Amino acid sequence: MARLLYRLGVFCARRRPLVFAIWLLAAVGLGVGAATGSQFSDGGFSMPGSESSRALDRMETHFPAAQESEDTGSLQLTLTSRTDSPIGVGANRRAVEQILEQAAGLPNVAAVSDPFDRQMPYVSPDKSTAVATISLTGVTDDNAEALHEQVVDLAEQAQGLDVEVGGSLGAGGAGEGGHASELVGIALSFVVLLVTYGSLVAAGANILMALVGVAVGLLGVLAFSALQPISSTTPTLALMIGLAVGIDYCLFILARTRNELREGRSLEDAIGRAAGTAGSAVVFAGTTVIIALAALSVVGIGFLTEMGLAAAFTVLVAVLAALTLLPALSRSMGPRMMPRKERHGRQTRNADRLTFLERWIAIVVRRPAVVAVSVIAALLVLCIPVLSMQTALSTPGGEDPDSTQRAAYDLIAEKFGAGAQDPLIVLLEGEDVQAQVGPVTSTIQSLPDVARVTPAGVSEAGDAAILQITPASGPIDESTYQLVRDIRSAASDLDGVQLSVTGQTAIDIDLNHALNQALIVYLILVVGLSLLLLIVLFRSILVPVIATLGFLLSVGSAFGVTVAVFQWGWLSGLFAAPSGNPLLTFMPILIVGILFGLAMDYQVFLVSRIHEAHRHGMRPVEAILDGFGRTAIVVAAAALIMTSVFGAFAIAPMSIIASIGLALTAGVLVDAFVVRMILVPALLALLGETAWWMPRWLDRVLPHIDAEGESLETDERRVPVSTAY
């Protein structure tokens, strides 16, 4: 691999116009595809193979007239008396009637329900609260927020009542502020690169390459969306991952190019050797990220597959940009990629620059047992919040605890029951379904945690009926989960009728359960892949085991920090996104996949140099000191860049993006600075020569991947250049 990438790097350096033209054509072609009409879905999540989803499809067939038009929606007005007087008498009733009359006159309002209707009253048992439903028409993505705001304005002007607006008509600006997060991440990354390189040209080139790569990758994702709609979250995730790895991969290769120049090599030879050594590591690391993200498709859930493949594509483009476009740009930069003082005299880097890191690693290898035990104990403490981690597809009442939507939801739950707003739907199917409604109702009513069972209609053909089940508990409570299981178990005792549980609550429960089960399988798959790839790369059994255990500690720490902030509410004032809610259901499996790839990045770049030094005859501790000294500053810079990018997303106002950003920020910090730069060296020092042991038979059968450029050391051919560095 090293020779192949060496030739590729030199070719791209010599054929700069051709390389630039190819990338320009790719960007234009994908841009045209994206401009033909990128399409985004509404962001809903479902699992087509689940019982609840299949039942929902059949219910739409049996009851076609009950399906709501795409351009309609509804909101709720929750009206509460400010005095001890009942809501339905005297001045309170007149105030209710006045606000409902005003609501009926608002634009796009089709109807307003009467909470005092004797046939369908919606008044709390204590007579203090009434709920009216506002049905709207002509609702679109463009006007949904404005329609919602006009109802909120009406509620705020109400006289004599406390009024909250429940429900939602769409995203409501959930994605606002995302572009600012990206700019903050890029700016911080540029500062880190400028300090690392000491060259404005090199830092600018690194950022430029990453931006070009992520732009082409995103254009590809958007071009695909013109053929098949994607979730609006998918490009944001692809941008987050593509930008971070793009900057880091260019950093590793460009830093190696500069090191080769410092050793006196010609410019093209330095570019080729950087592509053959650091480029090999980039290929390996990028491949692990791509595999981990693409492997999300094995879960079998459409939106997760979509996110994983989109992010994997942007990583692939980032790798290609680092291997082809960066060598071409490096040839154009020439000596300007070096600090000004090194351009003419070729001075070596200031030896004092790594003093702190040299002292750091010296302490680690001097007391490896104490260091390893202390680090493991500290990381296990960070993992403790994971024991209370709660996941849900959506937060009941909305994710913002200070919103009028959440206030209305909580008030209705308090006055009418926790499960009143999130009923379960039971679909009965059979030849004589009408006769089965009564017995099935009695059976379900007898189950624990059932507040009431309400027959909701029979199909025109008489072959299907709907029951509405109101749980006594909330939609994300374990009692409701158990109720769904109990109803499905009861279905086996029914003759002549097929019973299915559906509705949004049941769909959320099924999807949450499936993702939690898939996380275990996926974690096993990722851990197994980690072991296999690292065994092949490092020709060792124990080094991959150490790397994988470190990855598990990094993942646990990332989850622990995220639970403490976004679920427990610790330090919530530092973040714009709401806290105190369950984590999004698919967030853990995404973090496992992404963080796995990033963890392997640092493992490969740091330990491969240690392995290289050991292969050259150094004793284990000497190899650790040498390899660490050569790569630690670059790995630290790469980790700070990742942290800058992900940390910028962590301050976004949208919970899904902020929680993923924080989890990746914490995971990268722990993995790079604690696991890879403290724990792994300490364990390698403890194990000594044993760390690099491998059975001879296994060494013979495994393929050899030259990720350290060993073949280049024995290759006498040098690429002549006409321009000196």
Image: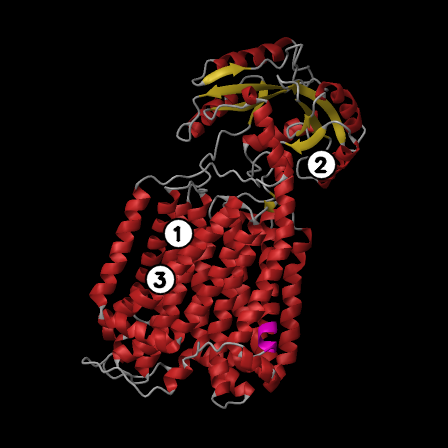
Disc 3 versus disc 2: distance between alpha carbons? 52 Å
Residue ID at (55%, 30%) = 404
Is disc 2 placed on a helix, strand or loop?
helix
Is disc 1 placed on a helix, strand or loop?
helix
Give, as a three-letter code, the residue at label 1: Glu
Closer to the chain start, of discs 3 and 2, is: 3
- Quadrant of the image occupied by residue 49: top right
Disc 1 versus disc 3: distance between alpha carbons? 12 Å
Q: Position of residue 115 (x, y in %)?
A: 62, 15
Q: Is residue 662 magenta?
A: no
Vertical arrangement, residue 531 with respect to residue 665, above or below: below
Give, as a three-letter code, the residue at label 3: Phe
Disc 1 versus disc 2: distance between alpha carbons? 42 Å
- Quadrant of the image occupied by residue 467: top right
Q: Mark 1 or mark 2: which is in front?
A: 2
**Label number found at residue 484:** 2
Query: Label 1 belongs to which residue?
Result: 182
Vertical arrangement, residue 693 with respect to residue 106, above or below: below
Density class for disc 3 (Cα within 10 Å; few <14, some 14-19, many ≥20) is many
Specify whether residue 407 is in view. no
The residues colored magenta run 541-545
Query: Label 3 belongs to which residue?
Result: 190
Closer to the chain start, of discs 1 and 2, is: 1
Residue ID at (24%, 62%) = 20
**Label number found at residue 224:** none
Residue ID at (59%, 68%) = 548
Q: Position of residue 201 (x, y in %)?
A: 27, 67
What is the chief secondary structure element of the magenta stretch? helix
Give, as a three-letter code, the residue at label 2: Val
Specify whether residue 117 is in view. yes
Is disc 3 placed on a helix, strand or loop?
helix
Q: Mark 3 or mark 2: which is in front?
A: 2
